[in-house]
Image: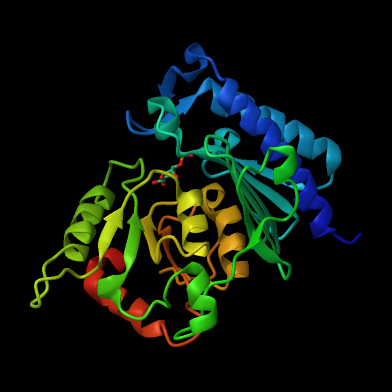
Amino acid sequence: DSVNLHEIHDTLVAVAFEAGRMILAANPSDISMGSKMNSADIVTETDRAVERMVSSRLRTAFPSYSFVGEETYVPGVTTVTNAPTFIVDPIDGTTNFVHGFPHACISLGFALDRLPAVGVVYNPFLDVLYTGIHGGGSYMQRNASLPQGQGQGEKLRLPLAGSEEDGKKVGPALGDLSTALVAVEWGSQREGENFEIKARVFRKLTARKEDGGSMVHSLRSLGSAALNLCATAAGQVDMYWEGGCYAWDVAAGWCILNEAGGRMASGNPGEWDPVLDSRIYLAVRGARSGQEEVVEEFWKVIGDGRM
Ligand code: IPD
């Protein structure tokens, strides 16, 4: 039977608000954390409680669809197949959540044929909602949970290269790497080469150029992959690079980015599997025309960071 993306979108938005209320109401004892891989890879009781709520709501509403969630993922067992699949991170930005830094979200993605088809990302601390539906555009809504906040919000439309009219809305078209604001993340893996490669990439991106500037305008590391993708979709940052994301970190934001006219120019194009070793993501805003050069320059600057 046919999949109704709008119905899925509306259900995910309702679930996101419910999750937001749980996250805001979490009491300090639920925030006390446990670690998974290492002390930088943390999970709280709230992450688990939100995922239980989300999976029960979605299994009730769409019993035949698959569900992949960060907290119930089993390495080597859980995979994203071609079936209609919800891909969920109950709290993306758990480190921020634990520290009370108000930059975390619930990330609710839906994939069809392993491609992002619906994305809902909600930051309850700032009450900002980002949504996207394949073929239906993407939107940013402030004061999203307030009665007057209901509605679609602001349509995200990234500028084409050199487009004046669109450029006024979300900043100038991306034309030069040295003026790009780039989001990067440390992530939570500390084993192997991964961490050292990141440190090298960050150093390369901030290296001084002959004209006294640096390779990029500046770096931002705000602690949520999903919100980084939304920030790229909204033109708040120009690019986002990370090595080590999982499907639930990117599924929802990827859809929102695509629908805004941005592009995922990842080092492993077309791959979509949470158990892949090489999980490099490079999101770029406004890459529809004329900006391939910036992406190429980025890969050149980071060198082995392409992995
Ligand atoms: C993490 C955050 C972080 C990113 C990691 C993610 P979590 O998600 O998005 O910014 O660097 O790769 O795993 O653990 O907070 O859900």
Q: Ligand 1 is located in which of the four quadrants?
A: top left
| Closer to us: 119 or 267 | 119
**In this figure, which colouring scheme has been used for the structure?**
rainbow
| Closer to us: 48 or 255 | 255
> Residue 190 lies in what quarter of the image?
top left
Residue 152 appears left or right of 143 = right
Asked if residue 189 is positioned above or below residue 231 in the image, the reply reads above
Placement of the C terminus among the 4 image quadrants: bottom left
Residue 84 appears left or right of 245 = right
Identify the residue at horizontal 33%, vertical 55% (top origin).
Answer: 184
Identify the residue at horizontal 72%, vertical 71% (top origin).
Answer: 135
> Residue 297 lies in what quarter of the image?
bottom left
Asked if residue 150 is positioned above or below residue 36 in the image, the reply reads below
Placement of the N terminus among the 4 image quadrants: bottom right
Residue 154 appears left or right of 257 = right
Query: Which residue is farthest top?
Result: 29
Residue 123 can be seen in this image: yes
| Closer to us: 10 or 94 | 10
Asked if residue 118 is positioned above or below residue 294 in the image, the reply reads above
- Count of numbered tags: 0
Identify the residue at horizontal 45%, vertical 72% (top origin).
Answer: 265
Q: Residue 137 location in percent, x, y?
A: 68, 67
Query: Which residue is farthest right?
Result: 1
Q: Residue 200 location in percent, x, y?
A: 18, 58
Residue 307 can be seen in this image: no
Q: Residue 166 location in percent, x, y?
A: 54, 77
Identify the residue at horizontal 28%, vertical 42% (top origin).
Answer: 191
Q: Residue 40 location in percent, x, y?
A: 33, 33
